[in-house]
Image (spheres, rainbow, N blue to C red):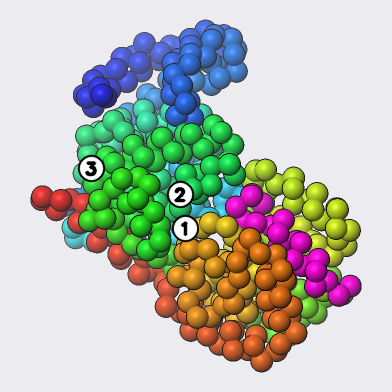
Amino acid sequence: MFASSPSILQARSELVKHTSALPARGEATIGIRVLYGGTDGSEFAPQTPFTHTFSQLAVLAQYDIIPAMTGTSRGNVHVAINAHLLSSQPGYRSAGVHHYIYQLLRHLKQTDDLHYTVLAGEGGLPPDISLSSRRSRWPTGRVPARILWEQLGQPWTLHRINADLVHGPVFIAPLFCTCPTVITIHDLSFIRLPHLFRPANRLYLTVMTRLSARRARRLIAVSAHTAAESAKLLGVPVERIDVIYHGVDPIFRPLPQDQVDAFRQKQELPERFVLCVGTLEPRKNHARLVEAFARIYDGESKLVLVGGKGWLYDDVFAKVETLGLNEAVVFKGYVPNEDLSWWYNAATVFAYPSLYEGWGMPILEAQACGTAVMASNAPPLPETAGDAALLANPQNVEEMATYLDRLLKDESLRSELQERGLGRAHQFTWMRTAQETACVYRRALEKGD
C-alpha cells in the first residue's frame, strides 16, 4: 500500500538537491502535492501562500542533514521523541499535551541502556530539559508545516541520527520510517464525539491516529478507559497497549491561607466561587455548567472559567448572555501552570463537567491543592477522581446544580473531600510516569514483540 522507506528517503534527497537554490520568498513557483489534514492529496497551485511556505520547507529540509546533537554520549538504544508540540507560546495549545510532553522530558533520564534525542521545533526546548536534542528549522508552529515535517522531515531525521525507536507523544508517528514506533493515546473524542470537532481536524486525527496505532510496536494509554477505547476503536490488540497515568506537578499543593486570601482580593474574587479549568471547546461542557450555576446563583458567588479559546465556543458566551450572568461568570482565559495553583487554592469548589476525557488532569491538580471537586461521571473521570469527588451526570443540569449547591454550603462535606483528594493526588508522580514510559521503550524493542 505504501512505498518503502528507502524510496521515501531517496525521494527526499532528490527534493533537497533540486530545491537548494530556490528563489527567495515571493518568487518561488513550485507546487507540492501533500496529504493535508489526512483528507486529500490536492496540489497547491503556484503563487498561493501555501506554495511559498512549502517551497521554503523543501529548502529547510537540507538543514535536517546537519547534526545538532548535544548532551550525553550515545547508549545502547537510541530513542527519539517528537516534541514539536511542546509549545513555547502561551495559549490553549500550551495546555494539556504540552504539559505531558514537558513533564515526560523533564523526568526521563539517560541510562546505560537508553539514550534519548528530543526532536524539537523552532523554539527549541525549555532550559530545564537536559536530554540531548535536535532542533529543526521547519516552521512547525504552523499546522500544515508540522504535518509535512512529521511525515517527510521526521523519517529523514530519524534515518540520519540512526534512531532505534521513535515516540510520538500525541497520537501520531511517521508512517514511513525504518525504526519501530510508540505512540501515546490521550483520548479518542474525535471518534466518539465527531460532531464536536471541525471536519478537517476530525478526519486528520481519525485517519492518522488509526494508521499510526496499527503500525506502532506499542501504545501508551493515559487511563484504563482509554486503553479499552483504543483496542475497540483503533483495532489494536490489548497486548500491545500499556496504561501509564499522568503525574501531578509538585507545584500543585495547598498554599498559605493568608497569601491565598490576598490573591483572591487582588483578583477581585468573592469569598465563595466555583472554578472550572479547561480549554473552551464543546466536550468540556461549559454551557451546561453555566446553566447549572444559574440555578443556584445567589447574587454573590461567581463561576470562574479558566482556559484559552479552543473551537466552537460561541455557545458558552451566548449562554452567559442569555441567562444574564455577565457579572457572575468570569472568563479568565489561559493561565500558565505556575499561576494555576493560586486559582485552585482560592476556589471553594472545583467543577469538571466534561463529556469525554482521556484522563482529566485538572481533577488531580485541584485535589492536590486541597480543593473539593465535583466532576462528571463520564469515563474515565471516576477512575481519575477515585472516592474523592462528587460525580454527576454531565448531561443532567439539575444534578450538577444540586451537587454544586451542596458543596458550596456544606463545609463538612468539603473538608471530607479535601482530605480524600490530597491522599488521592499524592499517588501520582511524573517520575513514575517517566520510569514506566522507559519500560515501554524497552518492551517495544524486545525480540518477538
Q: Is residue 91 above or below residue 176?
A: below
Identify the amino acid type marked 1: Gly
The residue at 57%/57% (across/down) is: 355
Q: Which mark is residue 188?
A: 2
Is residue 420 part of the magenta span, yes or no?
Answer: no
Which of pointers 2 and 3 lies earlier in the amino acid sequence?
3
- Where disc 2 sits, the SS reads loop
Q: Which residues are magenta?
A: 280-299
Q: Is residue 105 left or right of residue 425?
A: left
Q: CA distance from mark 1 to mark 3?
A: 25 Å
Q: In this figure, which residue is indicated by the disc labeled 3?
A: 180
In this rendering, the answer to whether 100 lies above or below 382 is above
Image quadrant occupied by the N terminus = top left
Classed neighbour count for the residue bearing mark 2: other residues with Cα under 10 Å, few (<14), some (14–19), many (≥20): many
- Residue 116 lies, in percent from the top left, at 29, 51
- Mark 1 crowdedness (10 Å alpha carbons): few <14, some 14-19, many ≥20: many
Please provide percent x and percent y for residue 50: 56, 19
Residue reaching furthest left?
447
Q: Amino acid at mark 3?
A: Pro
The correct choice, above or below, for 6 with respect to 358 in the image is above
- Whichever of callouts 1 and 2 sits on the residue coming sooner in the sequence is 2
**As drawn, is 309 to the left or to the right of 214?**
right
Query: Residue at left 43%, top 24%?
Result: 35
Point out the tag, 1 or 3, that comes first from the N-terminus: 3
Q: Are marks 1 and 2 in contact (CB under 8 Å)?
A: yes
- Give the residue number, with chain letter if any, for mark 1: 358
